[in-house]
Amino acid sequence: MKIAALVLALAAAWPAAAADVEVRFSAPEKFRDAGRAGADRERATAAIGDVFRTLGATLPQGQTLRVDVTDLDLAGTPKITPRGDVRVLRDGFDWPRIDFAWALEADGRVLRQGVESLAGVADDRHAALRSDSSVLPREKRMLERWFAQRFDTARPQ
């Protein structure tokens, strides 16, 4: 009995579920560079969607972040090698780019919205990029910076 009461008390004190996040990709087959083939494009859009969902999960419960990605250009240039496809960066100026519209909503009304065209420098010297093993670390970092600026969260290092 005491354990059940403790579990109920902890559940009541646990933070409520985070915001909802909806990510849509408009005409991904027309994106500038989301990979060489359909499977590459699916991996890239899934990874970008995951970044938006992870970031949006930090927003308060009851809010919904809606994102419509209209263009994507991944960092680097695809190159076919004997080991498979790789992305080659040319001295840090082949950075990622992403265009999207977004809206933050709550209780059926739009709180904030915007249209963004982000381009981020692919700086491999940055410690966060060297230690990041995610699928698209440069794109992820660019979106983390945007999110921190838009929603006043702690900025990534």
Image (spheres, helix red, strand yellow):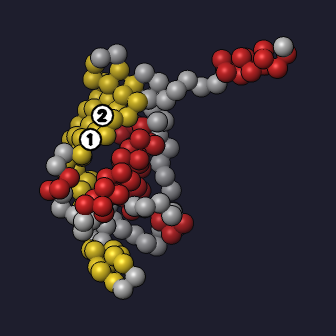
Does residue 86 show up?
yes
Where is residue 21? Give x, y as percent.
Answer: 38, 34
Residue carrying label 2 = 66
- Residue drawn at x 43%, y 72% is 124
Where is residue 109? Give x, y as percent.
Answer: 28, 18
Left or right? Give the position of 9 relative to 52. right
Q: Residue furthest right?
A: 2
Does residue 143 show up?
no
- To which quarter of the image does residue 80 belong? bottom left
- The residue nearer to you, when weighing 45 against 71, is 45
Q: Which mark is residue 54?
A: none
Residue 78 to residue 61: above or below: below
Residue 77 to residue 70: above or below: below
- The residue nearer to you, when weighing 29 against 114, is 29
Q: Are marks 1 and 2 in contact (CB under 8 Å)?
A: yes
Q: Nearer the viewer, mark 1 or mark 2?
A: 1
Q: Which mark is residue 24?
A: 1
The quadrant in which the N terminus is found is: top right
- Residue drawn at x 78%, y 17% is 4
Left or right? Give the position of 81 relative to 117. right
Where is residue 69? Give x, y as percent.
Answer: 24, 46
Where is residue 15? Give x, y as percent.
Answer: 59, 25
Task: Find the distance from the CA under tag 1 to the CA under tag 2.
Answer: 8 Å
Give the tally of numbered discs.
Answer: 2
Disc on the earlier residue, 1 or 2:
1
Neighbourhood count class around disc 2 (C-alpha, 10 Å): few under 14, some 14–19, many 20 upward = many
- To which quarter of the image does residue 38 belong? bottom left
Q: Amino acid at mark 2?
A: Arg
